Amino acid sequence: MKIAVFTDTYTPQVNGVTTSILIFQQELERLGHTVYIFCPTYGGREGKDPAGVFRFYSIPYRSEMMHEQRIALPISRGIWQFPTLKIDIIHYHVPHYMGAYALLLAWIFKKPTIHTYHTLFVKYTHYVKIRPSLAIRFVKWISRVFCNHTDRVLAPSEEMKKELIQYGVTKPIEVLPTGIDPHPFPDPSYIQAIRQRFPQERKLLIFVGRFAQEKNIPLLFDVLQILEQKGVPCHLLLVGDGPDRKRIEGEILTRGFADRISITGYVPRTDVFAFLACSDLFLFPSETETQGLVLLEAMSLGIPVVAADAMGAGELLKDGRGGVAVPATPKLFAEAAYQLLTDPALYFEKQRSAKEKAKEWSSHTMTARLLSLYKKTIKEYKTHRYRLS
């Protein structure tokens, strides 16, 4: 099968959508399928791409809060080569510029489309300088338009599916999380070397993700303080970067936490797993996650999770296996973390069930389901076209 993937975010940009695309791309190619990627340039930072990656010339947003995002213009050799690629299906991610180009090419060349709706955009309207209520109405409208012009929609969680139905999406919606790629356990000596960078007498808490307002990172500073008061001294490791970094660094200094919190910035994916492996607990206070892929990555290494009981993260942890989902308040987060850090039997059980659950959410399993949906969509599209004719 030949699959055209259109996305407004791809390497070198680091986020959950890019990770999801790379995992599925790797699995599909491993199974012998051909995946073509259509994505923006990043001002030359993308380096030399392998064959099959078609970049669209792009410009950055003027807004400082959105400087990581790109406006992709319809200037690419991929547009002219598209007819020769003999594409079977178009899979586009994000209802934005590249998604519009995907739908246009699908209409011109009569190709079936699938759209993965990754992001709860109504929680990101603070990035635009218009009235919040108007921004939310626009997001719901544009989401509905894109989804209803697609043959099938993929939602990473049941909660996201319900959200799209509320928007007025009438096309078939299937729930399909990304799953995680099997990753070897980091070298023990490397893990030990990393752990020695941080105070040995303190428990090591970790957050991995984009530094942005919607990730709710400052809540963890209150959790750190409450645990200290409860007699459990901890060190917080923040792995990532993003537009909110300066504000976060300022708050750390203001609150006098500089000796108890470390920031790594963006690190290679292999190092993310090493940082996870040397940690005692993964904390994730974001209420906007549609599937919680990074939670599964922590679980695959046996690291228990405390996450906000919302959207995909809450759905992932609703059975209590691998961690705890609680409302995103400092008190409840701290209580859940305290229980796990002071009850060895409970901690061991969460470790065991975390590894067990991670195996169930493998990328192999999810890719097999994706291929099944590709075939189903192609068949339905051909049947529909034949009936119309």
Image (tube, grey):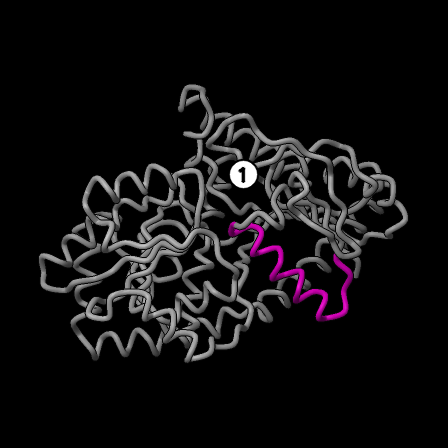
Left or right: residue 334 versus residue 142 is left
Residue 372 percent coordinates (x, y): 67, 63
Q: In which quarter of the image is the N terminus?
A: bottom right
Q: Write down the region rendered in magenta.
A: 15-35
Query: 100 or 376, which is in the foreground?
Result: 100
Left or right: residue 227 versus residue 99 is left
Q: What residue type is disc 1 on? A: Glu
Left or right: residue 81 versus residue 136 is right
Q: Would residue 92 be counted in the magenta stretch? A: no
Residue at position x 52%, y 59% in the image? 177
Residue 329 percent coordinates (x, y): 22, 47
Residue 357 percent coordinates (x, y): 42, 72
Confirm whether residue 26 shows in the render: yes
Q: Mark 1 points at which residue?
A: 68
Residue 78 percent coordinates (x, y): 81, 43
Q: Would residue 34 be counted in the magenta stretch? A: yes
Q: How many labels does the image show?
A: 1
Residue at position x 53%, y 73% in the image? 183
The secondary structure making up most of the magenta span is helix
Residue 106 location, quadrant: top right
Q: Is mark 1 on a helix, strand or loop?
A: loop
Query: 78 or 314, which is in the foreground?
Result: 78
Residue at the limit of the structure toward the right, as seen here: 84
